[in-house]
Image: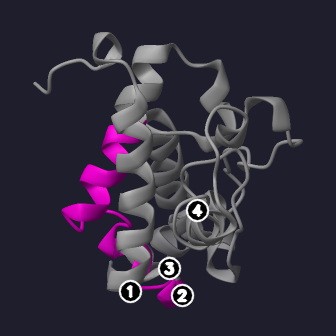
């Protein structure tokens, strides 16, 4: 009986390896990037690339372990959720209110140590931000947010 259960489990693991969502890799569309709306200094851009863009852009760097299921599904879910909350590659196409919300969320999430996610940094050690890097990103986002008209800033719920 145990042998049959193990065979079914093994067959299931093998079969799910062939069921994959599409990868998060798109042709760049620089016209929609956040840098077309707000200035992004090189120092900030480098930090965003290493710690944010895998889940918050239209292009993810996939590590070797993403070839295994169910890891790929788990990663895909993180990416889709991340892009729903903020997508640097689609920033320019958003409403002014959404842009303001996304900018506010950048510094709030970084300041509260909620981003990057622990589950991401466990495996991507290079994405762990130093206090200086956190301050760089947070100060940049706060400076931009301060320039946004109050009429576009919605109250936090």
Look at mark 1 in the image and give the residue it sits on: 130
Q: Image quarter for residue 34?
A: top right
In the rendered image, residue 127, in percent from the top left (x then y), is placed at: 50, 79
What is the C-alpha distance between the residues marked 1 and 3?
9 Å
Above or below, 139 relative to 103? below
Going from the N terminus, do you reach mark 4 or mark 1 first?
Answer: 4
What is the C-alpha distance between the residues marked 2 and 3?
4 Å
Look at mark 2 in the image and give the residue it sits on: 126
Tell me the residue at 57%/39% (across/down). Answer: 87
What is the C-alpha distance between the residues marked 4 and 2?
20 Å
- In the rendered structure, find residue 127 and report the number of the disc placed on it: 3
- In the rendered structure, find residue 70 and report the number of the disc placed on it: none
Please name whichever residue, 10 or 35, is drawn nearer the observer in this view of the structure.
35
Please name whichever residue, 9 or 45, is drawn nearer the observer in this view of the structure.
45
Above or below, 75 relative to 37? below
What is the C-alpha distance between the residues marked 4 and 1?
28 Å
Circle 2 — which element?
helix
Q: Closer to the observer: label 1 or label 3?
A: 1
Start-end of magenta stretch: 103-126
């Amino acid at each position: 009986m145990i042998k049959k259960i193990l065979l079914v489990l093994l067959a299931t693991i093998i079969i799910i390896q062939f069921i994959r969502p599409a990868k998060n890799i798109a042709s760049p569309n620089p016209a929609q990037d956040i840098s077309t709306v707000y200035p992004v200094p090189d120092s900030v851009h480098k930090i965003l690339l290493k710690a944010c863009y895998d889940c918050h852009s239209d292009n993810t760097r996939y590590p070797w372990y993403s070839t295994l299921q169910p890891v790929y599904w788990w990663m895909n879910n993180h990416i889709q959720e991340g892009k729903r909350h903020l997508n640097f590659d689609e920033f320019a196409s958003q409403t002014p209110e959404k842009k303001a919300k996304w900018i506010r969320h950048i510094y709030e999430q970084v300041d509260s140590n909620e981003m990057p996610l622990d589950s991401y940094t466990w495996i991507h050690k290079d994405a762990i931000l130093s206090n200086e890097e956190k301050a760089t990103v947070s100060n940049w986002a706060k400076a931009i947010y301060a320039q946004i008209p109050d009429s576009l800033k919605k109250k936090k719920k």
